[in-house]
């Protein structure tokens, strides 16, 4: 392998690592916000501040949904985002987690677009987040994952 190739591989590995951690932290931060970890509603940089406010936003983005289904949607999204956030952060099932992350954020972006207009998901980078997750799903897995550690142990 030439020096240029090894340098490119190193930068690709670092970029994949940073992308994986950024996506994972983003999901976990959103979950922390709706659980009030970052502070109550009204605190600067807090979107929801509690689960009730998050469910109100869930209802707003899903006007087709019966009111009785909104808590199910909210908890399902929260559970999925927690699992995906942890998986991405520690690097387990990285490609599958990237695919699920891409699908979750694409659904969120499309819901925002249909209900609030395209400028809202564009302003918050939701389409970029989705594209980044899909890219992670089809990119070589960085060497700082549990996936790589488990693969080495099997070999």
Image: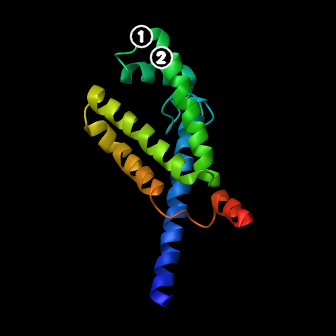
Other residues around mark 2 within 10 Å, as few (<14) / some (14–19) / many (≥20): many
Residue name at image x 41 percent, y 48 percent: 129
- Residue at 49% in and 74% down: 11
Which residue is labeled 2 in the image?
A: 70
- On the picture, is 119 further left or further right than 71? left
Q: CA distance from mark 1 to mark 2?
A: 7 Å
Residue 98 x, y percent position in the rendering: 49, 49
Tell me if label 1 and label 2 are in contact, CB under 8 Å.
Answer: yes
Q: Residue at x 49, y 66 (%)?
A: 15
Whole-percent x and y of residue 113?
28, 33
Q: Taking the image as drawn, is residue 33 in sight?
A: no
Element at badge 2? helix
Name the foreground residue: 58 vs 147.
147
Q: Quadrant of residue 111?
A: top left
Compared with 68, 49 (above or below) is: below
| Residue under label 1 | 66
Give the position of the C terminus as an image quadrant. Answer: bottom right
């Amino acid at each position: 392998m030439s020096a240029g190739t090894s340098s490119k591989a190193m930068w690709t590995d670092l970029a994949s690592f940073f992308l994986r951690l950024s996506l994972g932290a983003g999901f976990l931060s959103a979950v922390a916000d709706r659980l009030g970890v970052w502070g109550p509603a009204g605190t600067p940089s807090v979107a929801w501040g509690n689960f009730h406010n998050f469910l109100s936003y869930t209802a707003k983005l899903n006007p087709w949904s019966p009111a009785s289904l909104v808590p199910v949607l909210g908890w399902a999204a929260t559970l999925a985002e927690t699992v995906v956030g942890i998986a991405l952060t520690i690097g387990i099932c990285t490609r599958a987690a990237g695919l699920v992350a891409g699908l979750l954020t694409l659904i969120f972006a499309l819901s925002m677009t249909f209900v609030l207009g395209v400028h809202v998901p564009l302003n918050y980078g939701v389409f970029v987040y989705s594209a980044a997750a899909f890219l992670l799903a089809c990119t070589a897995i960085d060497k700082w994952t549990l996936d790589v550690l488990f693969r080495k142990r099997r070999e």
